[in-house]
């Protein structure tokens, strides 16, 4: 029975990772160079980024981490105007919401239940996250505007139900 649970857990994590990359490529109108996924084991500091809590068959947090300028450039590419200040913060949260919503919809079509909570945008002093049991990190490079790091922070005892 344990093997079956581990197998289901691995399948959910694999699907979540794949759907995350697919959703990012669908929502952001620029093609990134995708780095190699790696296991992340340290505490995570996010000076600027978006955190979206996942619930359901997978419980954890999706983190989009990058410089303010990167998020501003993505907003400009999507809406044709520069974004800063409160507009940048609002856009960054909505970008996270669009990506996480797309992931939730896509993973549902694969037979898994997930839901998302409202995004939290971090800035200035940042946020330190230590409360996760398993994490996957991948870096996306957008030519001429910078890098975005994606983290899937998962709670093992809550993956797969």
Image (cartoon, rainbow, N blue to C red):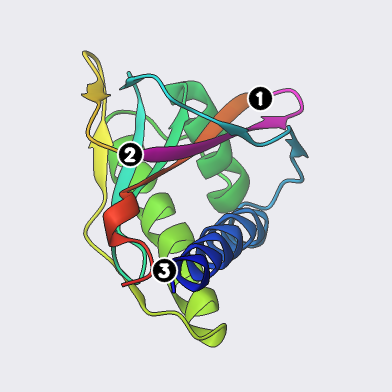
Sort mark 3 into few (<14), some (14-19) or many (20+) by Cα contacts within 10 Å.
some
Sort mark 2 into few (<14), some (14-19) or many (20+) by Cα contacts within 10 Å.
few
Q: Residue, x 36% and y 62% (percent of image)?
A: 159
Element type at marker 1?
loop
Separation (CA) of disc 2 from disc 1: 32 Å
Separation (CA) of disc 3 from disc 1: 25 Å
Residue 116's x, y, as percent?
Answer: 29, 65
Residue 124's x, y, as percent?
Answer: 24, 15
Task: State whether residue 49 appears in this view.
Answer: yes
- Disc count in the image? 3
Q: Residue, x 49% and y 67% (percent of image)?
A: 103
Q: Is residue 9 above or below residue 134?
A: below
The stretch in magenta equals 133-145
Quickly name the residue at label 3.
Answer: 101
Q: Is residue 40 magenta?
A: no
Q: Residue, x 65% and y 62% (percent of image)?
A: 26
Element type at marker 2?
loop
Quickly name the residue at label 2.
Answer: 133
Quickly name the residue at label 1.
Answer: 145
Q: Earlier in the sequence, mark 2 or mark 3?
A: 3
122 or 41: which is nearer to us? 41
């Amino acid at each position: 029975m344990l093997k079956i649970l581990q197998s289901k857990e691995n399948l959910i994590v694999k699907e979540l990772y794949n759907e995350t990359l697919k959703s990012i490529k669908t929502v952001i109108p620029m093609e990134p160079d995708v780095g190699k996924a790696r296991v992340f084991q340290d505490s995570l500091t996010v000076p600027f980024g978006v955190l979206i809590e996942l619930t359901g068959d997978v419980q954890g947090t999706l983190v989009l981490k990058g410089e303010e300028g990167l998020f501003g450039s993505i907003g400009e590419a999507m809406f044709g105007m520069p974004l800063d200040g409160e507009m940048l913060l609002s856009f960054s949260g909505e970008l996270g919401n669009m990506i996480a919503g797309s992931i939730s919809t896509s993973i549902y079509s694969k037979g898994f239940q997930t839901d998302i909570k409202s995004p939290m945008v971090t800035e200035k002093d940042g946020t330190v996250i230590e409360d996760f049991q398993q994490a996957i990190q991948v870096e996306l490079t957008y030519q001429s505007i910078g890098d975005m790091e994606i983290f899937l922070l998962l709670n093992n005892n809550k993956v797969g139900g």
